[in-house]
Image (cartoon, rainbow, N blue to C red):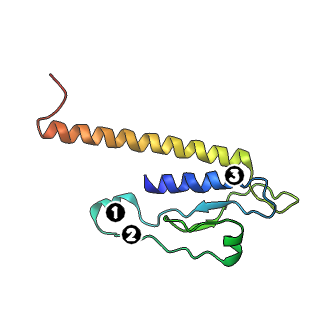
Amino acid sequence: MRHLGERQRVIAQNIANSDTPGYRAQELAEPKASFAAMVDGRIVTARPHVTLSEGMRRLGARQTSGGALIPDPSISEVKPDGNTVTLEDQVLKMGQIQADYAALTGLYRKQMALVRSALGKGGST
């Protein structure tokens, strides 16, 4: 869920800079480990450290607390001013984030119901 929240922040930043000349759309790098491997405890992940350049700071970029920012690999066009943000693409990504978040919260809710049931604290009367 943290990854989705951070990804939503990056997409919102892209949308906010859709008219900034020379702005390059960014994306959050996918986690390298599979979910199953992390649950089994076979893989322990650490957050990578992203260092901002002075030029990025002058443009208003802030140090993030999440994963690595990468150039958006799904750029469909480059505007004459060098901006690579396409609002339609960003809104579609935001919708996908919302759907993924809804799926994760649904799974979490069901998992908690199973745990409560196993403990004898279920809501069935």
- Residue 80: percent from left, percent from top: 88, 59
Q: Kindly identify which residue carries mark 2.
A: 45
* SS label for mark 1: helix
Tag 2 near tag 1, CB within 8 Å: yes
Q: Is residue 118 left or right of residue 82?
A: left
- Amino acid carrying label 2: it is Thr
- Amino acid carrying label 1: it is Met
- Amino acid carrying label 3: it is Ala
- Residue 52: percent from left, percent from top: 61, 74
User: Which one is nearer the viewer's eye here, 113 or 34?
Assistant: 113
The quarter holding residue 22 reads bottom right
Q: Kindly identify which residue carries mark 1.
A: 38
User: Which one is nearer the viewer's eye here, 56 or 122?
Assistant: 56
- Residue farthest left in this picture: 120
- Between disc 3 and disc 1, the foreground one is 3
Q: Which of marks 3 and 1 is nearer the N terminus?
A: 3
Distance in Å between CA atoms under marks 3 and 1: 34 Å
Residue at 65% across / 77% down in the picture? 53
The quarter holding residue 41 reads bottom left
* SS label for mark 2: loop
- Label 3: how many Cα within 10 Å (few below 14, some 14–19, many 20+): few
Residue at 78% across / 58% down in the picture? 20
- Label 2: how many Cα within 10 Å (few below 14, some 14–19, many 20+): few
Q: Which of marks 2 and 1 is nearer the N terminus?
A: 1
The quarter holding residue 40 reads bottom left
- Between disc 2 and disc 1, the foreground one is 2
Tag 2 near tag 3, CB within 8 Å: no
* SS label for mark 3: helix
Q: In this view, does 122 lie to the left or right of 80?
A: left
Q: Kindly identify which residue carries mark 3.
A: 16
Quadrant in which the C terminus appears: top left
